[in-house]
Image (tube, rainbow, N blue to C red):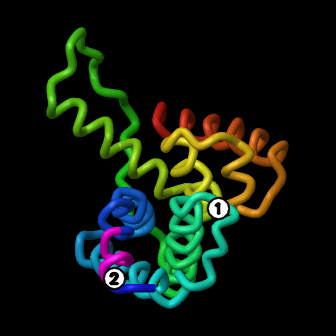
Amino acid sequence: MEEQLFLSLITANQGIIRKVCRLYSHDMHQEEDLFQEIILQLWRSIDRFRGDAKISTFIYQVAINTALSDFRKRKTTPLVEYTHELPDMQENPTDEVLKDRASAFTNALKTLPEIDRAIMALVLDEWNYRQIAAVIGITENNVAVKVSRIKLKLKNILTR
């Protein structure tokens, strides 16, 4: 693939890659390292893209597989601070409150097993179960069951 075409493809889909990096990294340096590794793996594998699915699906597959591989290499448990109390609810949450909630949700996602994290990343991007099943390599029915169970796990984590 031509370098300029590849770079435009990365630019158009960097949100997908960044999201996967955030879910599987503990800090900014690790996130950047993972981003670079995903780009490298995409460059190496882009010629195998057959066009059977959308390019974004292919990018998700490469990104998630690279992140899972990197995560398994590190074999570390993420450091997550748990809160036992929910913050007081406000009528119109401030930016700071929204930021805190987003951070708590991201931390909760990071406590999930690797595959569950990947599934939720796709759900949050509003992918349907058929698309998720294709990326993850499981049946649509299994995706539905997993999503339901993951939501319960997240609810339990966030309401502790």
Secondary element at image label 1:
helix
Asked if residue 151 is positioned above or below residue 2 in the image, the reply reads above
Distance from the alpha carbon under mark 2 to that under mark 1: 21 Å
Secondary element at image label 2:
helix
Task: Please report the residue visible at 47 percent of the width from the left and 81 percent of the height from the top.
Answer: 42
Work out whether residue 122 or residue 108 is closer to the camera in this orientation and state it.
Answer: 122
Left/right placement of residue 114 relative to residue 52 reads left
Work out whether residue 41 or residue 80 is closer to the camera in this orientation and state it.
Answer: 41
The residues colored magenta run 4-8
Task: Please report the residue visible at 48 percent of the width from the left and 71 percent of the height from the top.
Answer: 77
* Residue 7 included in the magenta stretch of the image: yes
Left/right placement of residue 10 relative to residue 94 reads right
Asked if residue 124 is positioned above or below residue 70 in the image, the reply reads above
* Residue 22 included in the magenta stretch of the image: no
Task: Please report the residue visible at 36 percent of the width from the left and 28 percent of the height from the top.
Answer: 86
The residue positioned farthest toward the top in the image shown: 91
Q: Position of residue 39 (x, y in %)?
A: 39, 80
Query: Which kind of residue does numbered mark 1 sit on?
Result: Ile
Task: Please report the residue visible at 27 percent of the width from the left and 19 percent of the height from the top.
Answer: 88
Asked if residue 84 is positioned above or below residue 82 in the image, the reply reads above
User: From the image, which quarter does the N terminus lie in?
Assistant: bottom left
Q: Position of residue 109 (x, y in %)?
A: 48, 51
To which residue does mark 2 refer?
Answer: 36
Q: Main secondary structure of the magenta part?
A: helix
Q: Position of residue 135 (x, y in %)?
A: 67, 61
Q: Position of residue 105 (x, y in %)?
A: 40, 42
Residue 28 shows in the view: yes
To which residue does mark 1 refer?
Answer: 115
